[in-house]
Amino acid sequence: MDAKKTWILVADGTHARLFSHDGPGKPLRAVDHRDFEGEAVKGREAYRDKPGRASDVSQAAPGRHVYEPKTNPMDEERHDLMREVMDDLNRHAQRNDFDELIVCAPPQTMHEVRDQMPKPVQQKIVAEETKDYTGDNEAELEKHLSHLLPIDPNARRYADPDRPGPPR
């Protein structure tokens, strides 16, 4: 019986990385060295250009008023990044390049991931971690996720006996 190939998506609002775990005894590795990066729009930089102003001659609130932006540039950036990541994952899922998917992202990014995730990718999810591991290397990530990665391909046992791992 071949070991299941588990992919791990690690994302935050401006970065996303994919890793692969090919089974017990095999190290975690980056998938095709593919890293996704957004523009990393920072707070004040997001609003560098001042919004326009308009005169209002209505009696309720006369004067000049600032046009409010309809969307937050940082939210747009996160949305665009997750769309790119989900398109890539969807292509790989349809080609069966991986059997299982673990998603790691902070809560706000996890919400964006869930909103944009296509069905073929959703069907492969075995676990989610609402933590930001984007700054971790392969060894640190493997340590954080040891309770989710298989250690015995035949019994499909997992490292932490209190956490039985993904449902089958």
Image (spheres, helix red, strand yellow):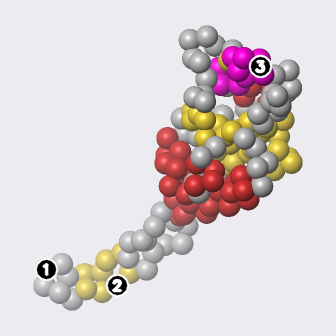
Position in image of residue 79 (x %, y %)? 56, 60
Residue 150 versus residue 92 in the image, above or below = above
* Amino acid identity at mark 2: Ala
Question: Which residue is drawn at the image coordinates 65% and 20% (left, top)?
Answer: 147
Residue 150 lies in the magenta stretch? yes
Pointer 2 with pointer 1, Cβ within 8 A: no
Q: Are marks 3 and 2 in contact (CB under 8 Å)?
A: no
Of residue 137 and residue 52, the one placed in the foreground of this image is: 137
Task: Specify the principal SS of the magenta part.
Answer: loop
Amino acid type of disc 1? Ala
Q: Which residues are magenta?
A: 146-157
Whether 60 is drawn above or below 57: the answer is above
For marks 2 and 1, the one nearer the N-term is 2
Q: Which residue is mark 2?
A: 54
Q: Which mark is residue 60?
A: 1
Residue 154 circle label = 3
What SS does tag 3 mark? loop
Q: Nearer the viewer, residue 65 or 150?
A: 150
In three-dimensional space, the C-alpha distance between marks 2 and 1, rounded to whole angstroms, equals: 15 Å
Residue 4 in sight here:
yes
Q: Residue at x 57, y 28 (%)?
A: 167
Quadrant of the image for the C terminus? top right
Foreground: disc 3 or disc 2? 3
Residue 89 vs residue 74, the one in the foreground: 89
Question: Among all residues in the image, which is located at the extreme top?
Answer: 161
User: Is 59 positioned to the left or the right of 63 in the image?
Assistant: left
Instruction: Classify residue 10 as left or right of residue 92.
Output: left
Q: Is tag 3's residue or tag 2's residue first in the polypeptide sequence? A: 2
